[in-house]
Image (cartoon, rainbow, N blue to C red):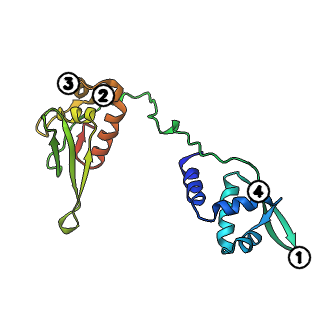
Amino acid sequence: MDFKQAAILGSYISKDYAEDLFRLLANYNSISASEAASRLEIHIKTAQDFLEAMSDLGFLGKEEVYEKKRPYYRYKLMTKRISMDIDLAPLYPKVTSDDRTALRIRERKNAGARFTTSRNNQYISNVVIWIGKGRERTERRINMTIPQGQFFFHLPFPSADSLSISAIMEKAEVDPAHLSEILDIVDALIEFGVIEKDE
């Protein structure tokens, strides 16, 4: 189950009529949306949407039947247990052939951002970015993990020569185990125009 499917399941399973609908499905050999709606005194579209969603997720079987030449669907419960099992493996960083740690970066001049150091002045605790202009300008604050803060404490200033990500990590003594979170925040700040990279 992916996040989209889990969101659909969570959305429908939280409805106050969900348990009653499943109780009907458990007690009936099959049921139509109109039958379920009239039994529970809910709108037919409400019942139809629920039954269709559960069918799309594979929890219900759906059969098209005809009555006086008008087709409609009957739904049947296909399982006695529903579990939400989300595969997080696709969210992990993908291993690529190119070495992104060789990317050379530095702070962009006039980026419109403010780096705040920690109380002990050993790492950056957050960065505040101003987005937009004039009255439309909004503030975006990103709090950093300690490894990210250590990394950005050693980010070259706009007037300095750029350094590779690996060189900054080494200088900051950031363990390579934190590389994925370093790359994530670097990508975000490049997108916000806070960091510039050598082309």
- Which of the numbered marks, if any, corresponds to residue 171? 3
Element at label 2: helix
Mark 4 Cα within 10 Å, few/some/many (few <14, many 20+)? some
Q: Amino acid at mark 3?
A: Lys
Q: Amino acid at mark 4?
A: Ala
Left or right of residue 23: residue 155? left
- Which of the numbered marks, if any, corresponds to residue 102? 2
Residue 62, given in percent of the width and then of the height, sits at 77, 58
Q: Residue furthest right?
A: 68
Left or right of residue 181: residue 70? right
Q: CA distance from mark 2 to mark 4?
A: 59 Å
Q: CA distance from mark 3 to mark 4?
A: 63 Å
Q: Earlier in the sequence, mark 3 or mark 4?
A: 4
Residue 62 visible, this orientation? no
Q: Earlier in the sequence, mark 1 or mark 4?
A: 4
- Which of the numbered marks, if any, corresponds to residue 142? none
Q: Earlier in the sequence, mark 3 or mark 2?
A: 2
| Residue under the point 34% across and 35% down | 181
Q: Amino acid at mark 2?
A: Ala
Residue 60, given in percent of the width and then of the height, sits at 73, 55
Label 1 sits on residue: 68
